[in-house]
Amino acid sequence: MELRHLRYFVAVAREQSFTRAADLMHVAQPALSKQVQQFEEEFGLALIERGSRPVRLTEPGRVIYEQALQILERVDDLRETGRRLRVAERNSFRIGFVASTLYGRLPEILRGYRLKRPDVDMTLLELLTLEQIAALKEGRIDVGFGRVEIEDPAITRVLLRNETLIVAVPMAWDAARPAGPLKMADLADSALILYPKSARPNNADRILALFREHGVRPPVIHEVRELQTALGLVAAEAGVCVVPASIERLRRDGVAYRPLDEERALIPVIMSYRKNDPSPEIGLILQCVKEDYEREGLAFGV
């Protein structure tokens, strides 16, 4: 049984005529009659009184007719639901981000995107970079802004920029040392506060690698889940924390920031999206990034 059988049967019942029903459905009358006959054979019942003029339904035919109407109405509802979902899909843009990017240029970039696409419903989800990759592949987000270089054949990554790393230190720690940039060796005797405490790879791996490259092994390492918690521990003089330079915009009592005088003290900002994604929004958000960087005098892709 196919939907066309229901539609042909309902048309005959409504029009009370095979001829008018055939005209309405734009099919030849013999073809329509055959389809209705096949429909009856599915039930093993006569649904139409043969030879009646106008066409009349049998008692079983009236029951089947009411059910067929409900089914076709549900099918039409489903089609309309699908249409609305397609429109919503086209008019929505879901963005994943790691928390630290909110202290960089991401808010300004998203404001620029909103100005260009005021009709698009933009959804923001805080996700670690590893979580963003999974969310992209599952279709839960359309683009992600992260910090970790994760290789995946299904994902395209674009390096937006490399951001300088700095050190968040307790005020007392800062006051007890000469002013100016720090070397990694200056952190050798201090407890290190790392974030996020989550599935690897993540931001913590890059920081630990930086310490290893300079032969520095922190005496104590505290791992925490969130940036705010890490800075809270710095304020409590529990240790120091290496963070992106943009975090300095997040002022917190008891915390000072020092630059790092190390060439490789960098952390990337990476935009990720599904490979071969045809959405024009991908190109537009990338354009917004480039326009923002140009205004701010930031080099793109380095």
Image (cartoon, rainbow, N blue to C red):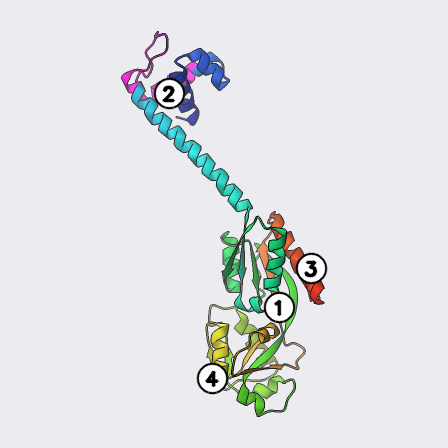
Residue 189 appears in the picture as rendered: no
Frontmost of labels 1 and 4 is 4
Q: Residues within 10 Å of mark 2 (few under 14, many from 20)?
A: many
Report the Cα–Cα distance between label 1 and label 3. Answer: 19 Å
Q: Residues within 10 Å of mark 1 (few under 14, many from 20)?
A: many
**In this view of the protein, which residue sits in the foreground, 68 or 183?**
68
Q: Which image quarter holds the C terminus?
A: bottom right
Q: Are marks 1 and 4 in contact (CB under 8 Å)?
A: no
**Amino acid tagged 1:** Pro
Q: Are marks 4 and 3 in contact (CB under 8 Å)?
A: no
Relative to 140, 264 lies left or right: right
| The magenta segment | 33-61
Residue 60 included in the magenta stretch of the image: yes
Which residue was labeled with disc 2?
39
Residue 37 included in the magenta stretch of the image: yes
Earlier residue among tags 2 and 3: 2
| Disc number for residue 268 | 1
Frontmost of labels 2 and 1 is 1
Q: Which image quarter holds the N terminus?
A: top left
Earlier residue among tags 2 and 1: 2
